Image (cartoon, rainbow, N blue to C red):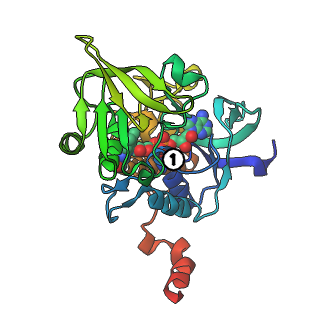
Amino acid sequence: MREEDIYDVTIIGGGPAGMYAAFYAGMREMKVKIIEGKDQLGGFLHTYAEKTIWDVGGLPPMKCSKLIEWLVQQANTFNPTVIFNRQMERFSRLENGILALYTAEGEIHYTRTMIIAVGRGVAEIQRLELQESNDNEPINLHYTVQNPEYFAGKRVLVSGGGNSAVDWAIELAKVAQRVVVIHRQSEFRAMERNVSDMHEIADVRTPYQITQLHTNGERINQVGITHTVNRDHIVLDVDEVVISHGYTSNLSDLASCGLMMSDGMVLMSQHAETNLPGIFAAGDCATNESKVRLIAGAFNDAIVAVNRAKQYLNPEAAKMAYVSSHNELFRDKNRNISRS
Ligand SMILES: Cc1cc2nc3c(=O)[nH]c(=O)nc-3n(C[C@H](O)[C@H](O)[C@H](O)COP(=O)(O)OP(=O)(O)OC[C@H]3O[C@@H](n4cnc5c(N)ncnc54)[C@H](O)[C@@H]3O)c2cc1C
């Protein structure tokens, strides 16, 4: 291991928590690496890139894809090393205290501290468990909505009960001929305000689940849905089917490395510390009593984790970075901005 291969902080995951941590660690003049399991930064935000985001402090409502763009730009301010398509699987501490991080692809990365910002892990879409949908999936069966306009004037069935299903139902109902939403539970697990909006503009049927897909070769033209309690069965004519049954995630590997978990998430202190020295957590993968699972919450965790990592490396370091107005690092950058 060469000295130049050792980073002050390695951030696992390039979602909002990881990206903001990279920026903030740059502000703290740390040598930063991000390891991201996919081929792009942005994390879970890519699954609702078309949604309008309202609740990030100080920003006007904007398409999530725009927010991703800005976050990526900000994350790169201090030129961190970013490694894509590498999934951190496990880690160990060497005799000299350096952490060795092992990826599923067979690489080892060395770091003095680590911030775990893996969200739900490298999330995989929960696919529809029906024989018809597994072999040669029909072309009008969707697991994500990239372009709501594609659904304009069509009869759409949305299946699911979480935030994504509700958000998509609302977006699609604005352009589709008709949106039917089904959920196998009576209650939706989504923001109350959005659930009310959905009830106003979509045809919501609960508790129903999909039990049959009728296809004419490559397209689904009818969907059989069954009431989960009284077994009432209805056949709906459809043009497009959107499945939003959530994601499977695997954070259990972290537990096997000695990290203390709670409800499948990494337990962190109010200072974003895990039970292991030099290892911090941020964003949706972390939990404590005051954890907020929002983009703004991820930013806050990132700041706390970086400041703590900085002090771990140098106990004399200031508790937090100088704010941008007093931070020398921005002097030249400010000059360039005021010139342009
Ligand atoms: C449908 C839906 C709508 C939402 N809408 C809003 C909203 O309007 N406003 C809001 O504030 N919040 C919203 N949220 C919440 C918000 O998306 C999350 O709080 C945020 O994405 C958390 O960021 P994160 O960085 O912790 O995790 P993520 O965004 O999940 O990013 C984690 C990253 O880590 C990577 N990764 C995982 N495991 C590994 C590994 N082992 N090695 C390397 N890389 C790894 C993943 O590929 C991913 O890129 C919404 C959530 C959902 C589900």
Residue drawn at x 31%, y 47% as measured from the top left: 177
Check disc 1 and give the amino acid type. Gly
From the viewer's perspective, tell me whether residue 130 is left or right of residue 193.
Answer: right
From the viewer's perspective, tell me whether residue 336 is left or right of residue 148.
Answer: right
Res 38 seen here? yes
Quarter location, residue 113: top right
Q: Identify residue for label 1.
A: 15
Quadrant (top left/top right/bottom left/bottom right) for the N terminus: top right
Residue drawn at x 34%, y 57% as measured from the top left: 56
Q: Around disc 1, counting alpha carbons within 10 Å, would you say few (fewer than 14), some (14 to 19), or many (20 or more)?
A: many
Residue drawn at x 62%, y 42% as measured from the top left: 38
Number of marks drawn: 1
Q: Position of residue 340 (x, y in %)?
A: 53, 86
Q: Position of residue 339 (x, y in %)?
A: 53, 89
Ligand 1 within 8 Å of disc 1? The answer is: yes
Front residue of this view, candidates 265 and 148? 148
Q: Position of residue 58 (x, y in %)?
A: 32, 64
